Amino acid sequence: MSRKRFVALRNRRAQAGEDMASPSNESLDVAASDFEALTEEFTKFEEQNKLYVEQQEKIYASQNKQLKDLAHHNYRLRQISDSLRKQKPTSTEDKAKIEKLQEEITTRKSQLTDIANTLPRRNNLYLRTVLGDLNLSLMSKAQRFQYKDEYEHFKLVVTMISAVLSFCNLFLFKYRFMDAAFHFLLVWYYCTLTIREGILRANGSKIQAWWVAHHYITTFLTGVLVTWPETPIYQAFRNQFYYFSFYLGLVQVLQYRYQHGQLYKLKALGERSTGMDITIEGFHSWMFRGLGFLLPFLFGGYFFQLYNAYTLWNLSKDPRCREWQVAVCAVAFFVLFLGNVITTLGIVLKKVHQRRGGKGSTGDLQRQKST
């Protein structure tokens, strides 16, 4: 109770001719009065909570109905499309009618895709295995953007920590337990990353298939590194791996700062329709403006992966090598190099071709959602 209410209560008692009670009785009366006022507030709060629960039930029922309607519309569109493909136009008028219907069906499919992005979707196999068949769809755009921002912040913080640890393990610490701690950090980081990216994809983030596969492969690679025992072959590769990890950490921080700035600009200009694009370890289709700045650093990291694969493959042929981890890591690094180079070059060549063809417009950027 506030001081003013306490004074008012005391004055009312004095006017009624009541004797002033002891300080302890006054405190008890004040507590009882406060609880009575709080009870009135709680009654209103309880009613609001009941209304909230009812609205949630209505939303859940509405979601189920929307999902059934969506499945119905997709099924009927497939039927109509199949029917049109079987049609053999006998006149120019029939041919024009079929083409018009096909265009309208394409537009309707795009509209249904936009609607589907607002509804809960079933988790992929990986998320169902890790988290179960939960509804991971976030209800509002604000929640989605907040989760995306937390994901970006998580990546930046852990990347900076890994770069610092790489430097320390390279120049300050030569202990196996520090190496193991670093490898466990990488395993935890990439496992967490794959889960978070799965949740983001369930909420509208469009991540190109290779970058999803890239993190699964890297999770496997870091898991193999954890099991690699300390041997002469391990020591022969140790420093090179930490040079690679330190360089990769710096490049990823640079990528984050650059891509985050580009995303902010494109969103402000209205050239990104969903606002759920994320930073990745590669090159986005919408990042052509940063081609000369970013590509040298990216390809430096890619060819470092190739060098790691080459070194490990040679070490696997060393007579002292008895570890299966060496050849497996060599193959994993080579696959990462190959996928990164092919994917990035494919995006760059496509954008160069579009620029030369005069298609590098804002509308084209809006259609490019490969991220």
Image: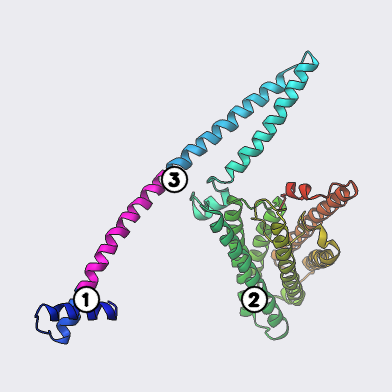
Q: Position of residue 227 (x, y in %)?
A: 63, 68
Query: At numbered mark 1, what does the secondary structure look like: helix, strand or loop?
Result: helix
Name the front one of labels 2 and 3. Answer: 3
User: Looking at the image, which is closer to me, 230 or 331?
Assistant: 331
Name the front one of labels 1 and 3. Answer: 1
Q: Position of residue 276 (x, y in %)?
A: 64, 55
User: Looking at the image, which is closer to me, 217 or 238?
Assistant: 217
Classify residue 142 as left or right of residue 20: right
Does the magenta stretch mainly form a helix, a strand or a loop? Answer: helix
Q: Position of residue 221 (x, y in %)?
A: 68, 63
Alpha carbon distance from label 2 to label 3: 42 Å
Q: Which residue is under mark 3?
A: 59
Alpha carbon distance from label 1 to label 3: 41 Å
Alpha carbon distance from label 2 to label 1: 51 Å
Residue found 62% across the figure and 43% down from its top: 114
User: Looking at the image, which is closer to me, 18 or 252?
Assistant: 18
Q: Quadrant of residue 166?
A: bottom right
Q: Which mark is residue 31?
A: 1
Residues in magenta, as a range? 33-60
Q: Which mark is residue 272?
A: none
Callout 3, which amino acid? Ile
Q: How many marks?
A: 3
